[in-house]
Image (cartoon, helix red, strand yellow):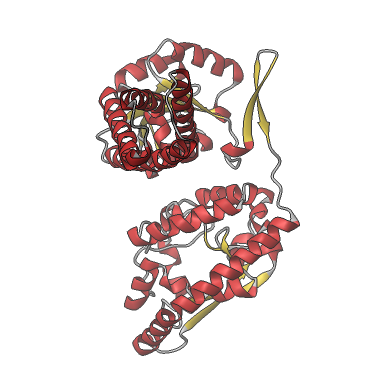
Amino acid sequence: MTILTVLSAVLDGLAVAGAFTLNAEAAPGERSTIVAMVAVVFAAVLVGLKDRRRLLAPVEELRRLVKGVSAGAVGIVLVSFALHVEVSRGWVVALWATSTATVGLSRLIARATIKSLNSRRVLGRATLVVGTNDEARIIARILERQPWRGYHVAGFVSVGPLATARLDGHAVVGTTAQVADAVARHEAGVVIIAGTATPPAELLELTRVLELLDVEVRISPGLPHVAASRMTVAAMDGLAMLCLRKPQFTRFQSRVKRSFDLVVASILAVILAPVALVIAMAVWFSSGRPVIFRQLRVGAGGKLFTIYKFRTMVPDAELRLDEVLGQNQADGLLFKLHDDPRVTRLGRVLRRWGLDELPQLVNVLKGNMSMVGPRPALLTETTSYDERMRSRLRVLPGLTGLWQVNGRHELLFDDYIRYDLYYVDNWSLGLDLWVIAKTIPALLTRRGSH
């Protein structure tokens, strides 16, 4: 950790030095020594960005970066004023803008390096998850799917008597009464507590024990569908209260989303038209007609619509469903089979790269779907939905979504639902842009595709 902090500080120092070099011609010439000293102070302010745990929180890191650079710029002005050094406002503004860019680049390099080292388990800390309920299992699955976060699951800690020795492939290492021993035995650096798994009295005792240990403690609030941006912590007579901002999907936001869909889908339809034509011809020549596969799906408000895809299976695939139902590899209400014999050779290639879904741009233009949204549900799924699951039908299904950028076919059914409900409750245009940006690398790496 210390080495990483020093290396990150050096990177930022070089970034600041680069910013000064780029603005050297406009810098004051008479008292350059003083300006150089201010530069050192400027770099020292930026060292405040060095908390490695913050590197994986981009919005927070950006806020701290701008704050640090701005504080350094103000420091230059104050020191120059106190020492009667002539400094032009234009030079300070240019230095601020250049430093923001160069330090931002150094942060991107540091983030990429740390993510890579975490994924290879060179860095990261052994993590214990307190609880064995659904929330605890979700936490463990997230950490397993996203090793770049730097939390490596060492096992679960049971709340109450041990009911099983293993859970989801991980050992249940003891009970909360044995947590100190479990931390020492597994050299854990992090303990994550599933809030819904721990009664208040036991949670209080657990945190008291963990405060005496050299571990980072994190507590899930038990609100899996609420974005952190909707939460603030307020004090009330010594109690920490979570304040939740109510989700609002106004008519204006609906219009913005629809306009965004029309613009993006129209541009993509024009650009990808030659690709679609080549694929259509390839499907026709390789396995005949029909080229387009049509299927009823459930859209917003439970309204049925016809979804379009390039056909990736043999023409009578739906009639042969009974032949493979017994081999289902999915859980919950889904059906998926990694080596489905009904999929054609060309179909496997199209699915792997997500090209079979190009015709869904027509669905977006028609208003049946959105560019980003929940996974389009089958009618057979929705008939088994409870009230919680039906919430995902409040918005249009998406050509892509959180389900796609977080694993696609690797996900459990509960994770599909969780991502969809999170999207419905926390929609923003920024979230749509983020999902679209993440879709491209998800397709290129072909993670979870088959």
Determine if residue 229 is in view: yes
Residue in view at x 42 percent, y 10 percent: 212
Determine if residue 141 is in view: no
438 lies above or below 180? below
Which one is in front, 141 or 426?
Answer: 426
Q: In which quarter of the image is residue 353?
A: bottom left
Give the image location of residue 368, x and y in percent.
64, 70
Q: In this view, does 13 lie to the left or right of 323?
A: left
Residue in view at x 32 percent, y 16 percent: 184
**Number of dots carrying numbers:** 0
Q: In this view, does 332 lie to the left or right of 129?
A: right
149 lies above or below 207? below
Q: In which quarter of the image is residue 347?
A: bottom left
Give the image location of residue 33, x and y in percent.
30, 24
Q: In which quarter of the image is the C terminus?
A: bottom left
Which one is in front, 317 or 262?
Answer: 262
Residue in view at x 30 percent, y 34 percent: 17
Q: In which quarter of the image is residue 216?
A: top left
Residue in view at x 69 percent, y 50 percent: 387
73 lies above or below 235? below
Give the image location of residue 413, x and y in percent.
51, 52
Give the image location of residue 363, x and y in percent.
59, 73
